[in-house]
Amino acid sequence: MKMIAQIVIASNSRATDRIFHYLVPDGMDITVGIRVLVPFGMGNKTTEGIVVALSDKSEHKNLKKIVSVIDDRPLFSESMARLADWIREKYLCTRYQALKTVMPSGTGVKTTEWVTLVGGDDTDTTPTQKEVLKRLKEAGRTADLGFLSDIKGARRAVLALSEKGLVTLDETVAQNVGSRHIRMVHLCGEPDFSKLQKKAPKQAKMLEILRPVGSIPAADLVALSGGSYSALHSLCEKGFVRFEDKIVYRTVYDKDSFEKTRPLKPTKEQAEILAHLKASLSNNDGTPVLIRGVTGSGKTEIFLQIIDHVISGGKQAIVLVPEISLTPQMVERFVGRFGPMVSVLHSGLSLGERYDEWMKIAEGKVKVAVGARSAVFAPFNNLGIVIIDEEHEGTYKSENAPYYHAREVAIKRGEIEGAIVILSSATPSVTSYYKACRGEYRLFEMLRRHNLSDMPAVDIVDMRSELQDGNRSVFSRRLLSELDKNISSGQQTILFHNRRGFNSFVLCRSCGQVLCCGKCSISLTYHKHDGRLKCHYCGFERPNADKCPFCQSPHIRFMGTGTEKIEEEIIKLYGEKSFIRMDSDTTTGKNSHEIILRRFESENIPILLGTQMVTKGLDFKNVTLVGVMMADLSLNNDDYRAAERTFSQLTQVCGRAGRGDLSGRAIVQTYQPDHYAVRLAKNHDYSSFYEHEIAIRRQLFLPPFCDIVVLLMQGPDVNSIIKELKEIAQRLKGKCDRLLGPVSAPYVKIRNKYRWRIILKCTDVNTVMPLLHNILQDYSKSENLLSIDINPNSMN
């Protein structure tokens, strides 16, 4: 009986977003979840595909055969395949985009087509074919097909030349990433090698080294003995040793470098929550749990103890953190408690490291996965619990297709696999807290710090008054006074400013023009350390301007303040060794987050200056002062969540102070001291903030009372974009509660592409989902790129 494989082609294109049927050759061992190579398209190009089903019949005739199998084991389970199907429907992505989320990163294959000139009569050839033959001669007779890509119709010409016997077309296939192997040498029995000591002393030396240990890496044996690989192969030929290729995992962290910890006695609040969580696990109660606990209330100890309970029951756990910068501290706590049973998953690892961590999880070698957003897909086969720390953070929402939210994915995965989901934050998202108040989540609140210390005292400094009093510095007098006290007493300070660079824009005072990126409608940011103006959206950069490019005036003024400028002020006040900076400019290197945080703690550096990555999760006992340089930066965004984000940032960063035995305080500098987000953050008053914010959302029909759908179209011709969006808007009329647009996006141009959008508000977005799928399919061949994001993280 013939077996038919149903295959998803490894392409993001909607043109290939369907199931293709292929014949499985006799004797080929194949199963759902593995990748294969198949001939695809008119040219039968060898292409990667994923087996999603097997059957014994097909409505299609003349099926092509699978070429070969890539994997020796499935890359995803049946439950993860169900999750991928849900992601495709929920987030309007292609089958392949959904499947990629549940497979290890970087496991794609690279197919290279090689064209070789054979020779022969080329008189009966077209001009394009002649050009191909000419280029091959110039290249030395063989070249990859990409070398000919600038010739229009090159592939068709090569196929025609191949049929005429003038060229050959071959393919090579290589995987992007895989397991790392080392060659091991094993001793075979107890050989008598006394004769070798005279005739081959190097070989005898190798056996002497090998005999006590039985096996050793070949490279180590050659190095220790002073011998050679040829001598080692001679021993193999004589039957004294044998070789074995062994998989070795790349090292992500040193498990022996973390201090071992023991469970602490739970407080009354912690004991109550732990009892509920254990009961939920026993009763298979899948209701998500929301823990609202003030900063320092002991939420992490709850995580550690409930995970210990889960592991003892034979199940596994996933812990999500919102930032790579938080992963080292969280890993330290979990490895300290669970040792080598912990795996780490985040984008800061190399592809090889991520692959190895994924394999360790899939093979059951670890029980806990700690990582950022994508760790929600860790391939555990008996998942018991998913914990999302700082669940309010926007980084849990993917900015690229599929536009999934890790919180929603975790809850769906818990539903599929029978795992419980814990959401945790000192400042839960308004949507999550609303669901908890409605009974969709079980709510627990921890309103005191675990060591019963007081929350940091927060002072609001009105920067308008500072300016009126003649203080033009980025530091208020109050913040400088408190900094002086901290430095003189040997205590540490965190300064938060959510804008990197030196100046945020450059202005000509003669003509009023702002220097902008030529590809984007974005002002360029001045970076003093290399004297360049940079676009933070497309990466364009240019030397600093000494005169206006518009009117040639020399009156150029640098406006706004970034972390680099604050750094310069700190150096003037306290010297170069007084601080360490943590933003996306200083954390590009591998393990840079961990290095910066370890230095800050171990060297007792007085000041940690950073962007939003310093606002959450950090726990340093000697930090007693937090300074917020400009609270207004997040308030003035064109986003309905601006107040929510500002309140969360202020509450979270102020909570970094006073987490040890010493009391903490925070200074918040602002030009809007009366704004409710700032005023309520002063008293860490989440309940009042929530009541104020939910009333506004209800009145303006904003989430959680509706879903917001943004249809964003990008392209080189603004008129074409508006025309197509008007067509789409006509199709959507009457299908949702409210429709706005087409309107230009706040950043109307990025990377030379204009950006316009339609915004929908839907009481129930599911009613319009089939139409949105159809619209994406209908416009997939447009010269403009259409994307649809439901409840996007940014409205820009």
Image (tube, helix red, strand yellow):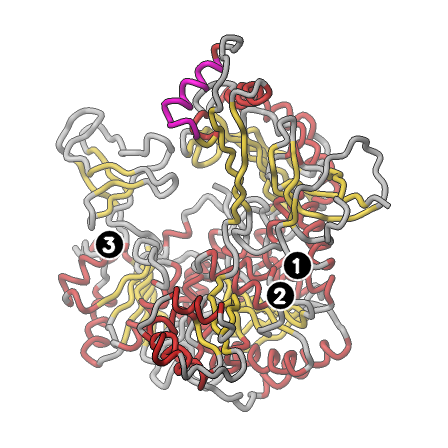
Figure quadrant of residue 104: bottom right
**Which SS type dominates the magenta stretch?**
helix
Q: Earlier in the sequence, mark 2 or mark 1?
A: 1
Q: Are marks 2 and 1 in contact (CB under 8 Å)?
A: yes
- Relative to 709, does residue 176 appear above or below in the rendering? below
In the structure shown, which secondary structural element does the residue marked by tag 3 occupy?
Answer: helix
In the structure shown, which secondary structural element does the residue marked by tag 2 occupy?
Answer: helix
Q: Is residue 23 left or right of residue 163?
A: right
Give the residue at x 31% y 67%: 596
Q: Nearer the viewer, residue 25 or 706?
A: 25
Count neighbours of disc 3 (C-alpha within 10 A) and say few if under 14, some if 14 to 19, many if 20 or more.
many
Image coords of residue 336 (percent x, y): 47, 81
Q: Which residues are magenta?
A: 128-142
Q: Is residue 600 left or right of residue 277?
A: left
Mark 2 highlights which residue? 362
Mark 1 highlights which residue? 73
Mark 3 highlights which residue? 564
**Residue type indicated by callout 3:** Glu
